[in-house]
């Protein structure tokens, strides 16, 4: 009898324990979901709250160390903070757990392999980056994603001194881009694609200047494109992508000229001026006319301006100026923008403003330029650049007008908003309008812009 009572009590205790464990597990699961949801919200708001996303995803990982999506989320936030090593480690962990979503709606964040490749690229580990991009190329489900992967892998091949592979990837990028455009017609798809390939849809400029590789974080706020194709077009896309991956690529002098331009641009960004000039010169010899030559002359002028060889910079600008009017290219806006920035670097403010005006004038006829954006090759708004040049001339009224007009655009990213507020603060300060300067500095800081502490100290000294 007593044994039966004891067994019954043990059974009751076990049942209660199991129930408690189930409730505890359910509670943890709910907390994990809630933390992850909060993390995505932090990542998708403007300005982006990367620290909040990291805190929430870390909490989710602590509650459930096997949660691949939490690692995926934290990796995206670390990427936004430019913690490339930390982001790569989290993407790797998410991949190891084997439950990584291909793409999370509505944030449009690409696959972990693609993003990990980007982190390796930023860490200058180009071999690992190529390997990661190759996996993504093999698994991409849309032609625009394939295009972005080929763009980035091409840049890595350039820096590995594999010029022919880079040229092949550039041509495959163009083929996949052409395929995507043939199957898409909505404006939002064009905007998504613009983000996906770094702001230059299909023209030579991106491929010839080596502008920044596609940054996975831009898709966190890039909006949701139309992802629904009818079955016939979906089948056409998959067949087309297969053909792109298997296409036999013939490499011409023009193709090599483009790749030398890419490498020259990368060399100039790494302060390897001599190497950059050699590659720009190789490019011009291979292709002395047309848009590739314009890009090379402008690139060479930029390098000469940076190393204070003004006469050589002016000579290359003159050569570029001769060629630009004869170029019927979707990149003419970018050429004038670059021309203006080099003139500004040389201190030729009037010439710079004239070039920026020409860029703005040709923008409406440029098929890939959204008139609400007018971003130059460096993803900076042309009005910001012209405003800075007006400011350098001491014409702060026109500078403020340009900054204010740029700030009315709702398509600018947080960092660019911050820079414009800061530049406008400088102009307000020059006009002794300290209250407005203080307000703009606060807004610049809010958007995450790193304001010069000396300017803050100077502002404090006159506004108290």
Image (spheres, rainbow, N blue to C red):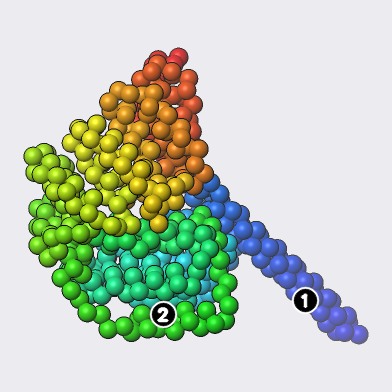
Circle 2 residues within 10 Å: few <14, some 14–19, many ≥20 = many
Mark nearer the viewer, 1 or 2: 2
Q: Does residue 355 lie above or below 135 as drawn? A: above
Residue 181's quadrant in the figure?
A: bottom left
Q: Tell me the distance, in whole angstroms, between the alpha carbons under discs 1 and 2.
A: 57 Å
Identify the residue position indicated by label 1 in the image.
14
Could you say which is closer to the camera, residue 442 or residue 242? 242
Q: Does residue 166 appear in the picture of this structure?
A: yes
Res. 81 mark: none
The residue at the point 24 percent across, 56 percent down is 327
The answer to which quarter of the image holds residue 166 is bottom left
- In this picture, residue 330 sits left or right of residue 26: left
Name the residue located 77 percent from the left edge and 76 percent from the top edge.
Answer: 14
Q: Secondary structure at mark 2?
A: helix
Judge by depth and name the residue closer to the eye, 358 or 176: 358
Position above or below: 130 against 322:
below
Q: Position of residue 243 (x, y in %)?
A: 37, 83
Q: Secondary structure at mark 1?
A: helix
According to the image, label 2 marks what residue?
Answer: 241
Residue 386 in percent (x, y) is at: 33, 35
Vertical comparison of 417 with 243: above or below? above
What percent of the width, then of the height, locates residue 425? 41, 27
Q: Nearer the viewer, residue 55 or 446?
A: 446
* Image quadrant occupied by the C terminus: top left
Which quadrant is the N terminus positioned in?
A: bottom right
Q: Residue furthest front?
A: 326
Residue 408 drawn above or below residue 28: above
Residue sitting at 44 percent across and 51 percent down? 370
Residue at figure coordinates x 46%, y 29% from the top left: 440
């Amino acid at each position: 009898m007593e044994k039966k009572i004891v067994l019954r009590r043990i059974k009751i205790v076990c049942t209660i324990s199991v129930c408690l464990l189930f409730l505890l597990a359910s509670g943890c699961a709910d907390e994990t979901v809630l933390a992850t949801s909060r993390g995505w919200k932090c990542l998708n708001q403007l300005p982006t709250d990367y620290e909040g996303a990291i805190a929430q995803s870390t909490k989710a990982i602590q509650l459930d160390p096997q949660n691949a999506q939490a690692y995926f989320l934290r990796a995206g936030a670390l990427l936004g903070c430019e913690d490339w090593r930390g982001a790569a480690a989290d993407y790797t962990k998410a991949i190891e757990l084997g439950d990584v979503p291909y793409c999370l709606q509505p944030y449009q964040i690409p696959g972990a392999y693609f993003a990990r490749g980007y982190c390796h690229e930023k860490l200058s580990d180009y071999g690992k980056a190529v390997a990661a991009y190759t996996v993504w190329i093999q698994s991409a489900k849309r032609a625009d994603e394939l295009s972005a992967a080929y763009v980035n892998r091409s840049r890595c091949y350039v820096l590995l001194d594999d010029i022919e592979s880079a040229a092949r990837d550039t041509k495959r990028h163009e083929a996949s881009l052409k395929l995507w455009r043939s199957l898409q017609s909505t404006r939002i798809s064009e905007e998504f694609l613009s983000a996906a390939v770094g702001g230059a849809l299909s023209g030579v400029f991106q491929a010839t200047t080596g502008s920044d590789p596609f940054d996975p974080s831009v898709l966190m706020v890039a909006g949701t494109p139309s992802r629904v194709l009818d079955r016939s077009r979906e089948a056409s896309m998959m067949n087309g992508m297969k053909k792109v991956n298997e296409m036999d690529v013939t490499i011409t002098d023009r193709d090599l000229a483009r790749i030398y331009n890419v490498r020259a641009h990368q060399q100039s960004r790494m302060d390897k001026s001599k190497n950059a000039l050699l590659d720009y010169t190789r490019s011009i010899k291979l292709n002395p006319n047309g848009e590739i030559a314009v890009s090379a002359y402008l690139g060479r002028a930029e390098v000469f301006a940076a190393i204070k060889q003004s006469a050589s910079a002016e000579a290359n600008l003159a050569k570029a100026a001769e060629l630009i009017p004869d170029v019927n290219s979707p990149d003419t806006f970018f050429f004038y923008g670059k021309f203006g920035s080099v003139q500004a670097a040389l201190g030729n403010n009037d010439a710079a403003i004239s070039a920026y005006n020409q860029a703005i004038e040709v923008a409406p006829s440029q098929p890939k330029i959204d008139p609400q954006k007018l971003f130059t090759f460096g993803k900076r708004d042309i009005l910001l650049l012209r405003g800075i040049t007006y400011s350098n001339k001491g014409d702060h009224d026109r500078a403020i007008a340009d900054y204010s007009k740029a700030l009315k655009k709702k398509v600018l990213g947080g960092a660019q908003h911050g820079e414009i507020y800061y530049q406008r603060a400088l102009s307000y300060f020059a006009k002794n309008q300290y209250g407005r300067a203080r307000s703009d500095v606060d807004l610049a800081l809010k958007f995450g812009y790193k304001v010069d502490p000396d300017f803050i100290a100077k502002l404090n000294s006159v506004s108290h």
